[in-house]
Image (tube, rainbow, N blue to C red):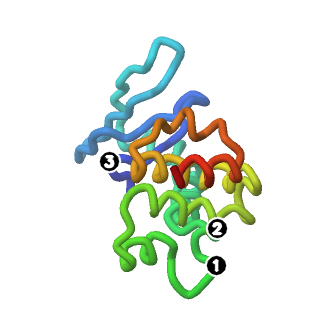
């Protein structure tokens, strides 16, 4: 059954179900003009069912992606249990997933969050610190 928030294909475009009624449903179709609402009768649901089933399967994967579940605990559960703040959580997330998602790019993102934390702890300018090598950074924060 279609639920509010489901994504379906409508005339080759992604459409989000915004309302469901006994007689039909309303979707929001994104297009070049930004988007528009379209009412559809329940009878049209069958023509979109294959797309909806594929989306639901994709949503299951999106809700529990492999890159966050390689160990016995999900990354966000570890972040929560350790009481990490936003920056610590982001660092943990990027390090935990880097092999399965974006490789070294995620490690660079983790480094950027580390530099931001250093800037906040030391009250130094993030953009100034970001330009430094690790050795220069270590010297700069020891002052």
> Can residue 113 be seen from the camera position used here?
no
Relative to residue 88, is residue 136 drawn left or right?
right
Residue closest to the far left:
22
Secondary structure under badge 1?
loop
Residue 74 x, y percent position in the rendering: 51, 76
Mark 2 or 3: in front is 2
Residue drawn 45% across and 27% down? 29
Nearest to N terminus: mark 1 or mark 3: 3
Report how far apart the C-alphas of labels 1 and 2 lie in the structure: 6 Å
Identify the disc placed on residue 23. Answer: none
Relative to residue 120, is residue 21 drawn left or right?
left
From the viewer's side, name the closer residue of 75 and 45. 75
Q: Are marks 2 and 3 in contact (CB under 8 Å)?
A: no
Q: Are marks 1 and 2 in contact (CB under 8 Å)?
A: yes
Packing grade of label 2 (10 A; few <14, some 14-19, many >=20) is: some
Residue closest to the far top:
33
Q: Considering only vertical position in the picture, is 39 above or below 122?
A: above
Q: Which residue is mark 2?
A: 67
Figure quadrant of the N terminus = bottom left
Nearest to N terminus: mark 2 or mark 3: 3
From the viewer's side, name the closer residue of 34 and 37. 34
Relative to residue 104, is residue 48 drawn left or right?
left
Q: Which residue is mark 3?
A: 4
Q: Which quadrant of the figure has residue 124?
A: top left
Residue drawn 72% across and 49% down? 105
Residue 43 x, y percent position in the rendering: 41, 42
Residue drawn 35% across and 24% down? 37
Mark 1 or 3: in front is 1
Residue 24 x, y percent position in the rendering: 31, 40
Residue closest to the far bottom:
72
Q: Which residue is mark 1?
A: 70
């Amino acid at each position: 059954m279609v639920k509010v928030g489901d994504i379906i294909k409508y005339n080759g475009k992604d459409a989000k179900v915004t309302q469901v009624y006994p007689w039909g449903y309303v979707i929001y179709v994104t297009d070049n003009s930004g988007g528009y609402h379209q009412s559809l009768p329940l009878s049209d649901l069958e023509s979109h069912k294959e797309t909806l089933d594929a989306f639901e399967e994709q949503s299951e994967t999106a809700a529990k992606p492999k890159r966050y579940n390689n160990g016995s605990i999900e990354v966000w559960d570890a972040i929560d249990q350790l009481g990490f703040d936003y920056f610590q959580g982001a660092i943990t997330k990027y390090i935990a997933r880097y092999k399965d998602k974006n490789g070294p790019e995620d490690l660079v993102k983790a480094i950027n969050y580390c530099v931001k934390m250093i800037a906040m702890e030391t009250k130094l300018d993030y953009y100034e610190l970001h330009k430094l090598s690790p050795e220069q950074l270590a010297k700069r924060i020891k002052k």
